[in-house]
């Protein structure tokens, strides 16, 4: 009997059909996996392309963007190789003649001329294509902006063989680097740069160099200076920090109440509160604005204080310190905390507030980081609401600064993209520093166990 069983076990045949089905299954699974990887790769390329285009455009000159050149010369070695040596110059001033569009000055306008015999290889190539020969002259117009009865020149305009202001000209202050627009080539970005280190009524002491920092980061420097980004950035940092602080405080308290406390109508109130998140922002924008104006009038009439809400940080932050999504996210996480922890804390005489601050919050770093990142992005990118509740640059955020490069003559896209890169950097840094907690907060929210 044992021999029969053993023979049966050893002689059981393997079906050829099952082996074929296994190979077909493996091939089909690999094919499906390859198609999925291909779709994900294409999706990633499509998603990252706008960011790559923004970076490339931020390095282009106005002419490169107008001519739709894909790769900017600023990201090639062409402008930076074989540059002539730096030098220090002393030039004599003489009375200015026939300058058109001259700004006001408290002293007689003076001018100087610098003969340019060497330029960077890239500029030489571009000038040759425009039939502009070397050498040429850089004209400097000196003006005095200080009303102190002294001839102390501190503002200068640089042009190339022209006394017409704003036609290939650049304004600089004493001690600042700048260069004229060399025939429109890169708006003066690639040619020799000048810094006037000393100015008297008789002569100028000038450093001539090739400012590589300006050559590479020219659009970023111009965007930062022209759009008053220093002021706008500080405004954005303050309003974003205040908004995040308010959202965290109100969100944590409300989420804990919905998750751990019992009171009549809790579920109905939570559903109603969560439903407010479904209302589009455009629907509540006008009511919020009317409330801000009413509060502004109330404080002005009652206390005689103006701009307590309108054109102030209060209107930019307080309406966004309560967020239904934040409450929902934290409530789902707080609900996962075992009841045994609260029972043990209650036995030790722990109140709800102490349990929240000493037990719940230390183990809720992941969802809290998620709340900080999401609300930080929303507050930082706000544009429409700040334009409505502000009338000056006193409290306007950095996003409003980007609109300064759009005029009736057209948009300076390269500066807009450079400004966009500047506005994106803080958010990217915040995300990279907290991405682990952010992904954990999204992955664990709402899970039980």
Image: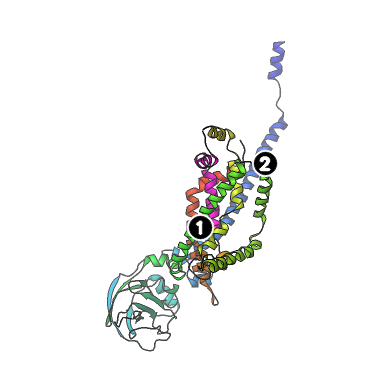
Q: Name the magenta segment's main secondary structure.
A: helix
Magenta range: 349-378
Q: Residue 37, percent across and down?
A: 60, 47
Residue farthest to the bottom, as pictured = 98
Q: Quadrant of the C terminus?
A: top right
Coloring scheme of the render? rainbow
The residue closer to the viewer here, 315 or 217, is 315
Residue farthest to the front, as pictured = 302
Q: Quadrant of the N terminus?
A: top right
The residue at which mark 2 appears reads as 28
Judge left or right: residue 81 versus residue 324. left
Residue 266 has which mark? none
Query: Disc 1 versus disc 2: distance between alpha carbons?
Result: 51 Å
Q: Residues within 10 Å of mark 1 (few under 14, many from 20)?
A: many
Q: Residue at x 39, y 89 (%)?
A: 98
The answer to whether residue 361 is magenta is yes
Residue 240 has which mark? 1
Q: Residue 385, percent across and down?
A: 57, 64
Say which quarter of the image contains residue 3: top right
């Amino acid at each position: 009997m044992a021999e029969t069983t053993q023979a049966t076990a050893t002689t059981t045949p393997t079906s050829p059909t099952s082996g074929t089905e296994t190979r077909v299954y493996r091939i089909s699974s690999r094919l499906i996996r390859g198609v999925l990887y291909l779709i994900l790769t294409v999706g990633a390329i499509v998603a990252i392309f706008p960011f790559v285009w923004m970076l490339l455009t931020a390095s282009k000159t106005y002419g490169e963007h107008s001519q739709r050149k894909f790769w900017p010369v600023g990201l090639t070695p062409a402008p930076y190789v074989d540059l002539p040596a730096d030098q220090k110059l002393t030039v004599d001033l003489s009375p200015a003649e026939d300058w058109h569009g001259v700004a006001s000055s408290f002293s007689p306008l003076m001018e100087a001329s610098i003969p340019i015999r060497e330029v960077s290889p890239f500029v030489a190539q571009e000038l040759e294509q425009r039939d502009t020969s070397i050498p040429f002259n850089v004209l400097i117009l000196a003006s005095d902006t200080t009303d102190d009865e002294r001839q102390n020149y501190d503002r200068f305009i640089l042009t190339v063989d022209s006394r017409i202001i704003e036609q290939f000209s650049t304004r600089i202050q004493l001690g600042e680097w700048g260069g004229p627009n060399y025939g429109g080539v890169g708006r003066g970005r690639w040619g020799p740069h000048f810094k006037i280190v000393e100015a008297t009524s008789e002569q100028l002491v000038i450093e001539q160099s090739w400012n590589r920092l300006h050559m590479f980061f020219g659009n970023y420097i111009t965007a930062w200076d022209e759009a008053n980004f220093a002021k706008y950035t500080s405004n954005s940092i303050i309003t974003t920090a205040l908004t995040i602080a308010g959202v965290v405080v109100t969100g944590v308290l409300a989420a804990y109440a919905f998750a751990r406390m019992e009171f009549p109508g809790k579920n109905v109130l939570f559903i109603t509160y969560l439903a407010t998140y479904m209302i589009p922002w455009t629907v509540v924008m006008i009511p919020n604005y009317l409330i801000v104006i009413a509060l502004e009038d109330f404080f002005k009439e009652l206390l005689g204080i103006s701009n307590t809400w309108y054109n102030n940080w209060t209107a930019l932050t307080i309406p966004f310190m309560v967020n239904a999504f934040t409450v929902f996210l934290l409530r789902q996480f707080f609900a996962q905390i075992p009841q045994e922890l609260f029972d043990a804390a209650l036995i030790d005489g722990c109140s709800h507030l102490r349990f929240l601050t000493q037990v719940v919050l230390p183990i809720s770093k992941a969802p809290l980081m998620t709340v900080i990142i999401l609300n930080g992005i929303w507050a930082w990118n706000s544009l429409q609401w700040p334009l409505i509740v502000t009338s000056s640059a006193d409290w306007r955020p950095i996003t409003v600064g980007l609109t300064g490069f759009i005029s009736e003559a057209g948009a300076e896209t390269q500066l807009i993209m450079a400004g966009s890169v500047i506005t994106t950097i803080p958010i990217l840094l915040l995300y990279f520093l907290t991405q682990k907690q952010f992904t954990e907060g999204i992955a664990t929210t709402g899970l039980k166990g």
